[in-house]
Every structure is written in C-alpha cells, then in structure tokens.
Amino acid sequence: MDSIVLLLDGIGNALSWSVLAATLVGVLIGLFVGVLPGLGPAAGVAIMLPVAVGFGGVEAIAGLGGIYYGAMFGGAVTSILLGIPGESASVMTVLDGYTMAKQGKAGEALGLSVFSSFVGGIFGLLVMALLALAIARVAIEFGPTEMTAVMVLAFSLVSVLGGRNIIKGFTALFLGIWIGMIGMDPIAGPPRYTLGSMDLLDGIDFTIIAVGIFGLSEIFFDLSEKSVETRAPAQYSLRSLLPRISHMNRCKGAVTLGSIMGFLVGVLPGVGATAATMLAYAAAKKLSCTPDEFGKGAMEGVAAPEAANNSAAYVSMVPMFTLGIPESATTAIMLGGLLMLGLQPGPLLFANNPDFVWTVFGSFWIGNVMLLFLTMLMIPLLAGVVFVSTALLYPVVIGMILFGVFSINYSASDVLLALGAGVLGYLMLKLEYSAVPLVLGVVLGPMLENNVRRTLILSEGDLSVFFERPISLVFFLLAASIICFPLISKFVSRKVRWSKR
Amino acid sequence: MKIETLDRVFAIFLFLLGLGIAYAAPSYGYMIDGNPGPGFFPLLVGLAIAGLSMVNFVRSVTGKEKLAQHISLSGLIKPLGMLVVLVAFVFLVEPLGMILACAALVLTIGWIIHPHWDRLFAAKLIATAVLFPVAGELAFGVYLGVPLPKGLLGI
C-alpha cells in the first residue's frame, strides 16, 4: 500500500512543468527512434544521454526513460505499416500486424498495438512500483561485501547478455573494466593508463563511450551494410487509424497474457523484452480458440507481443533502480546516466533520494499516458519519418552527438574519444562481440574494484569474509549457477550427441 | 580482407593490449600493506584480456568461430569517409566555430551518404545544414550555457 501512496505522490510531483516537458520530449524522441529501423532504444538513449544529463536530476531520467518506452511504442508502427521492425522487440508484431496492413486493416492493427502497449505499460509500471520498494527494503542492509557479490552477479549476466560467443562476451567485459580504470585510482590516488594526458586524469566519461559504442557504431554499421535510399510510402487511410472498442474487447485475454508474460520474463536478468514478445505470442497462440489465424492477420497476434514488450520494458528497470544491476544495453546506459547525476543506483537510492525515485516513476506513468494519445495523433508523421532519407537524418543525428559530447567537458578531444569508441563498436558489431558486457564493465568495474579493495582492507586481507555473510553467499551462488548452467547444458548436449553417434 | 582475418587481427591486438595492461600494472603498486593496491585489479584484468583473446584467436584459426558478417572495401567507403570528416571537424571547430563547422559537417556527411545530388535533395540538405547548427547553438549555447567555440569570425 505504501508503494501506491508513494507512486501517487510521485505522479503529483511529476506534474511540474519541467518534468512534464522532459517526459514529453523524451517520449517524442523515443517514438521517432523506435520508428527508425537503424536505431534502437539503446542507441537513442545513448545519443541523448549527454543532452539529458545537462538538464539534471529527475528531468534527465524522465527524458531518458521516455525515449526507452517511447521507442517500444514507436517500433510497432513500421512493423505494421512496412513489415520492418523498428527495434528487435517489435519483430513478432510484424507477423500479424503487417499481414493485417496488407489486408487493408493497418488502422485496426495500429490502434490495437497502441491500446495493448498502453495496458502492458500500466501493468509493468504497477509491478515496478510494488516490487521496487520491497526489494529496496531488503537490500538496504547491504555493505561492501554484499555489493561485491551483487557486482559479481551482474557480471555473471555476461553469459546471457554476451551474445553467441561467451568468450568474446567476457573479453568485452574485461575490456570495459579496463576502460573504467583509466584515470586516477579512487583509493590510493596514482593515475593509471593516462599516457601522461591531463584530460584522462578524471577518467573517460561514460557518455562518450556509450555514444560511440551504441550511436556512432550503429550509423557506421548501417552505412556499410546497405545502399541508402528512400522507400515508397505505404498506402493507408488516416481515418482507419482509430482503435475500436470491439477489437479491444476481443483482445483483452491476449493483452492480459502478454502483460503477465512481459513481467515474468522482464524481471529475469538478461532475458529482455524481445524474448518476452516471443513467449507471449506463442502462449497467445497456444491458448487461442483459433490458432490457425495466427500469422494470417490475427488481432491477438498483435496485442500479445505489444503488451509484453511494454510490460517488460518497465519491469526490467526494477533491478537497475533497486540493486544497480542493468538487464539490457538500454538500462546499462540509464544506469550510467544515474551515476553521472551523482546518484548511486541501489537500495540507498530509495532511502536517500525517495523524491527523486518516486517522481521518476511518476513521470514514467505520465509518459505512458502521453504515449497513448501521442502515438494515435502522430502515426501519420511517424510513418513519414521512415521515408526520410538517411542522408538527411544521419547528419542531424551526428550533429546532435557532437553538440552533446562537446558539452560534457567543453573539449573537442572528447569527440575523438567518441569516434574511437564508435570504431571499436563497429568492429565489435562486425566481429560479433556484444557491446553490452563492455558497457557493464565500464559502469560496474570501478564499483567492483572499490568494494573488493574496501572489504579486503576492513578484513585485513581475509578472503573468507565474502562467503561468511549469507546474502553475499546467496549472490555468489546465483552468479556461479548463471555462469555454470549454460556450460553444463552445453556439456550434456554434447555428451548426448556423442552417445547417439 | 576477409572477416576471419579481421577477427584474428583484432584478437591479436587485444592480446597485445592485455599484455601491455598487465605489464604496466605492477608499476602502480600491486600490494600495499598486505592489501590490493592500484595495480592489483589492472594486472588481473590485463591477464584476463590477453588470455581470452588468445582463446578467441585459436578458435578463429581452428575454424571453431564462424562469423555471419562480411566485410568489403566498397562497404567501408562511406563509414571511412564519415570518420575522416569527423576527425577534420575536431581540428576545424576552433578556427571555424561550432556553427560553421557543424554546417560544413552536415553538408559533407549528407553528400557522402547520398553522392547523387538532385535539386530537391540539395535544397533539403542545405536547409538542414543552415537550420540544425542554429538550433544546436540555441539549445546548447544559449539555453544550457555551454561555451561553444566561436571561431575566428566570432560566430
């Protein structure tokens, strides 16, 4: 009940003009980012991070959150109108949404996607508010030992977030940890790996890395992969874009199922919204009276994955706020944003900055309502963005990156660092190194180092202290099981294959 | 260059980087008063990067690592062109100022991406090159108070 009261207070605080404006700008940018096939929510949040942080506090995170869930809404538009998913979590929407559009039901599909996204989002927000406080209350007892265990647990997620090749995932993680070490040592003081540069004494700003790794690299990759051209506009009637109550009624079961599935999958570390949409689609088909219609333009085939991806997007922020564990690239960048604002994500955030946390949650709630109306109003415009030539779009995006990066330290040399990160990100994309572990390493690496060294100083070098406290022991065991489970299952499946031969 | 060759070159680069990190680490102080010093973590991280990169190299050489991506020189022309323009921007932003340098950047990148100019596209690109830097100056320079470079012309 406390959570509901705090959330209502947060919504009240988020109704201030500055937070409303930040949320509005965030969701608008998110909608456009979601529509663009080349850029996902992670790239959108990374590109806007330096700009958002300039506005400070609640406004920054409200805006970045708006980009994240706005992209989730926007991704469905191109999936339905053009059969091109704006971002990975919209892939399942293509199956029935695009088929409906080809049958002349684009408006119905879009209306349903907006309605389902809204309901899924509201469900995810409610769960987020209820879970966050409960987890934060337990986690407030954490000391450096427990925090070390939490960091190790976060790093163990590389085995699920690290892409196809776990070894490359861990290579990227350690590379990120090293990048995070560049600069003055926070405990003893000597500069490390600065090559004598005064600019590097304070370390490399996280935003510069994020902008390069997720923003510039995506643009380099996109340009190297295809010839740039504009597409022919799709035909649809503007009047048909309004949702109908009968359709909402028909899809209420699929929406409920998708919302629950989004919560269950979204709260799991490293699984993500895309997996939630796939499971929701499969479950909706399994439970449907007319499973044969799926893939041929079933309304439930649009409703279930759209509800799931929005529910999962909000729920995946729970571990970020309560434990400081990012579950995806987007939440990793937002975690970096919190640190840049001088806020330490984790249980103490709820105790020390309750106004901040609950106002941000309130802004998410308002953003979700804004998106319901904005998406309906802006669908024609959003669809039009897809037809804007990248030759006009990318120079503007790069220009925004340059203004943002320059404004961090008022230094043009930061642009060179961002370019270096962009080239590294491009190579990683090409060579199938996941960028998420690298970002995890940059953000959490320095925290892990500090906590380990502080713990060992307090325990006078006794390593057993990490395993004596029950909470840290549980986290270490969880981390070990997360790392070992894929290895064991791989070993078992290999043994089965050998025995069959 | 084949993607597999690039994969091996990158693995070797990371291997050498890892060795370099580990080599430099003890100079920061491995242990201080029996506790981990500033060089403790870098040593472990450097060795981990070197070790894992060597495994990646061996996997690539033995054909265990199969990459789905391809790389071609023609595909690299546009990203490389953009990279050159961005490096040039860094050196030109002080003498030209943010507005002029950004306008030149928008025009050049637009041309690199879409080298076949027609009148309509040229008009749109020029309008973008004029309006966007001004909007950026207003948002960052005026509203956020960022001291953007003014250049020799003072704009």
Image (cartoon, coloured by chain):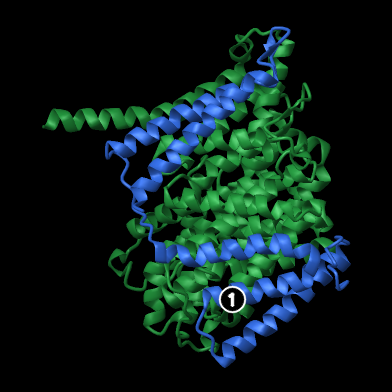
Chain colours: A green, B blue
- In the image, taking residue A245 as reference, residue A499 lies left or right, namely left
Image point 48% across, 60% down: which residue?
Answer: A221
Image point 33% across, 67% down: which residue?
Answer: A294
- In the image, taking residue A289 as reference, residue B109 lies left or right, namely right
- What is the quadrant of residue A462 in the picture? top right
- What is the quadrant of residue B64 in the picture? top left
Q: Position of residue A500 (x, y in %)?
A: 12, 32
Q: Position of residue A420 (x, y in %)?
A: 60, 50
Taking depth in this image into account, of A325 and A196 the one nearest to the observer is: A196
Outermost residue toward the left?
A: A501
Query: Could one spot residue A332 in this view of the protein?
Result: yes
> Pointer 1: what residue?
B110
Taking depth in this image into account, of A378 and A201 the one nearest to the observer is: A201
Query: Could one spot residue A86 in this view of the protein?
Result: no
Image point 81% across, 68% down: which residue?
Answer: B139
Question: What's under tag 1, amino acid-wise?
Answer: Gly
